[in-house]
Amino acid sequence: MKKAHRVQHRSKDGMLTVFFTRHWGLSYRFKYSETGSGTTTYHIGGIAFVF
């Protein structure tokens, strides 16, 4: 009988939101993940509005 192979995934992510006024700001998100088939990295930026 074959022994099951455990696949290990490593990832890092973070998010930052900075407000310039009471309602408006900028948002940034970073994600990095590593799998057996390769790596994925992405950056997302946007405008944040709170009402």
Image (cartoon, grey):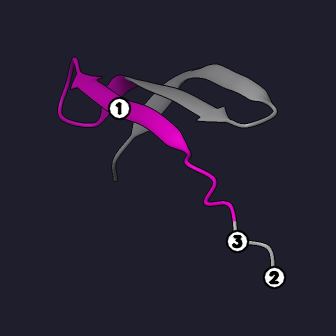
Q: Quadrant of residue 27?
A: top left
Horizontal side of residue 12 vs 39, given as left or right: left
Q: Is residue 6 above or below residue 8?
A: below
Q: Is residue 17 magenta?
A: yes
How dense is the environment of label 2, judged by Cα within 10 Å: few (below 14), some, or many (20 and up)? Answer: few
Question: Which one is in front in this view, the residue at disc 1 or the one at disc 3?
Answer: 3
> Residue 22, labelled with which disc?
none
How dense is the environment of label 1, judged by Cα within 10 Å: few (below 14), some, or many (20 and up)? Answer: few
Q: Is residue 43 above or below residue 33?
A: above
Horizontal and vertical percent position of residue 26: 39, 21
Q: For mark 3, what is the residue?
A: 3
Q: For mark 2, what is the residue?
A: 1
> The residue under label 2 is which amino acid type?
Met
Toward the viewer: 11 or 16?
11
Between marks 1 and 3, how big is the CA–CA gap? Answer: 36 Å
Toward the viewer: 48 or 27?
27
**Mark 2: secondary structure:** loop
Q: For mark 1, what is the residue?
A: 14
> The residue under label 1 is which amino acid type?
Gly
How dense is the environment of label 3, judged by Cα within 10 Å: few (below 14), some, or many (20 and up)? Answer: few
Horizontal and vertical percent position of residue 46: 54, 24
Residue at position x 61%, y 60% in the image: 6
**Mark 1: secondary structure:** strand
